[in-house]
Image (spheres, rainbow, N blue to C red):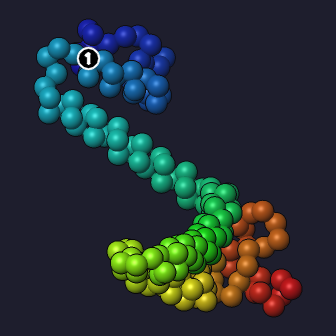
Amino acid sequence: MALAEAEPSQFDAAGNAKAKTPAAKRADEQRALRRPDASWAERRKLLAARTQAARKAVAQFKVEHLEELAAELEPRARAAVADIEAALQNLVAATRSYSAVSGAYSELLRPVQGLDGSDLPPALWVATMSTWAQKALGKEVRPPLPRSLYPEGATPPKTKTAAGWVSGQYVSDEEAA
């Protein structure tokens, strides 16, 4: 920028250039983006820098607020496990219902001459789903919690923050009981 184009507010009393505030930098970027003679490469570069700065700010926020963010996600992780278990139980119940209705049709058609129920859809895949769901119900469904914050066999501190996880002061299941 030429000295003739500079505004007096950009300098301090000694004539040194003042450091620009973030708002002033954004205003300069906006002007640069709106300049009719700005090249697309220049605009892409400015937008890429903005994107990178925004991503950096989000990452910094996550680092600074890890405890609160992790504590906020934990109930959702545990609810997801409950949802999976409920869905498996519903699947087992639904396959039993399907099999019962299929059997009822077969029984209904048995005494009718020429109808034996062989035109019913095969229920093998339903039986397979039922078997799979029953086996899955016998397994532990672990919540999607990172082991770096929730070590094996540890439960979060009784407080609603993740301070104990981050600082390494974990409460084991035996200590929590």
Q: Residue at x 82, y 71 (%)?
A: 158
Please tell me in which quadrant of the rendered image residue 137 appears.
bottom right
Q: Which percent across, then down, holds residue 127?
A: 47, 84
Q: Which percent across, then down, holds residue 152?
A: 63, 87
Q: Which residue is mark 1?
A: 34
Whether residue 144 is visible: no
Which element carries disc 1, helix, strand or loop?
helix
Q: Residues within 10 Å of mark 1 (few under 14, many from 20)?
A: few
Q: Residue extending furthest right?
A: 177
Looking at the image, how many numbered discs can be counted on the residues? 1
Residue 84, compared with residue 37, is above or below; it is below
Whether residue 73 is visible: yes
- Out of 106 and 61, give the one closest to the viewer: 106
Q: Residue at x 42, y 42 (%)?
A: 54
Placement of the N terminus among the 4 image quadrants: top left
Q: Amino acid at mark 1?
A: Arg
20 left or right of 40 in image: right
Q: Residue extending furthest front?
A: 113
Q: Residue at x 73, y 79 (%)?
A: 155
Placement of the C terminus among the 4 image quadrants: bottom right
Q: Residue at x 41, y 18 (%)?
A: 10
Q: Which percent across, then down, holds residue 36?
A: 17, 14
Please tell me in which quadrant of the rendered image residue 120 appears.
bottom left
- Out of 123 and 62, give the one closest to the viewer: 123
Q: Which percent across, then down, holds residue 144?
A: 56, 72
